[in-house]
Image (cartoon, grey):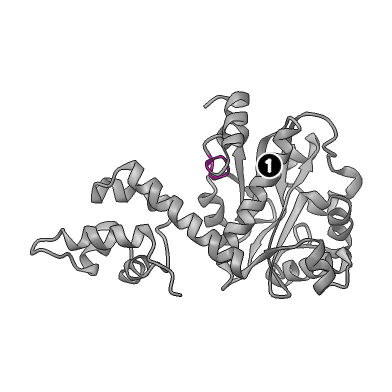
Amino acid sequence: MTNPPSLFARKLRDWRASNGAHGRMTQETLAETLGVSVDAISKYERSASFIRGDLEHRLAERLGWTRDDILACREDWQARNQRQAQSAYQLLDDTLVDRYFGGSWRYAINDMITMAQSEFDFLPDELAPDRDLYLPIYDTYPDNWRAVLHKDQIVAKWSLLFLRPEHEEAFRKGNLIESELTVDRLNRLLLPGTYFGYCPALIILKRHEAAASLLLSSFVRFLEALAERDILLHGIGTISCSPGGAQVCRDLGMTRHGVYFMDSAFGIWELPGNAIANSIFARRSPLLRRRYAEAYGG
């Protein structure tokens, strides 16, 4: 069965059909109006893509759409992607570890690190996904990461480590050395309070972008589980190592406030705790919106 067109596709086609100098507006004119390519318009109207988050405001400013219209289109698109992702992709769990990794989580972690190494083989030693470093970390902190499978292949992952004050300070100064983040030098979340989360890598392999929705949902559930234990984050930080990584940081609402000392092209990004209540994570979770608004205002 063919999927019905997205709400965004239908609304954009309807708008184009009723506007223009001589009736129906062309895709070329609409592309020029929104400041995107004609190929992008074609993908929007075929339900193959959704407008980038940092361009959504143009729908209101240039097409006259209301905020509720835009929000409805975004929520429809997210729900659509989640349904598709859930049918093709699965979060790694005990059942899948038994099926594809002989029941060994260590084998699965090894595969995840191998994927990271293949994606980031250009990184300096200070940021490289070192197996000797990360295998014991992921083994010791199994709740602090999630991976998504497509068939028997790991195609996406996130991880979040909790830094002690000295490493948090080093991160903000742009001289954090990941190889120093050994198991015994990371924060263990034993007591309620606020902590700083550092993401060594968010990876979604090319042609597996549909896994993003499932990956995001798993991260939201992780933050919810922490909030239920009265554990909140006063910041989430990461280092972007490519233009694509920087765009992901922007899409997540993070702010770039420095460069990494090894390479000025590598950016230091952070989502502060007082911004989480209005972030993409809180938009998916009333619990996160409420708890972070109570803690930080907003």
Which of these two is toward me, 82 or 167? 82
Which residue shows up at 57% across the image and 58% down it?
213
Query: In this rendering, would 223 be left or right of 13?
Result: right
- Note whether residue 243 is visible: no
* Vertical comparison of 172 with 34: above or below: above
Looking at the image, residue 181 lies above or below residue 147: above
Q: Is residue 256 left or right of residue 192?
A: left
- Of residues 37 and 20, the one nearer the viewer is 20
Q: Secondary structure at mark 1?
A: helix
Q: How many marks overall?
A: 1
Tell me if residue 93 comes above or below residue 230 in the rendering.
below
| Residue located at (48% from left, 60% from top) | 80
From the top left corner, tell me how far across and down residue 152 is, in percent.
73, 75
Please provide percent x and percent y for residue 18.
Answer: 16, 59
> Is residue 103 depicted above or below 265 in this figure?
below
Report if residue 187 lies within the magenta region.
no
Name the side, left or right, on which 58 lies relative to 50.
Answer: left
* Residue 185 in picture, x, y percent from top left: 88, 43
Question: How packed is label 1: few (under 14 Cα within 10 Å), some, or many (20 or more)?
Answer: some
Name the kind of residue labelled 1 in the image: Leu
Look at mark 1 in the image and give the residue it sits on.
223
The residues colored magenta run 279-283
* Relative side of 266 to 13, left or right: right
Q: Magenta segment, principal secondary structure?
A: helix
Residue 64: percent from the left, percent from the top? 24, 46
Residue at the image position 63 percent from the left and 59 percent from the top: 241
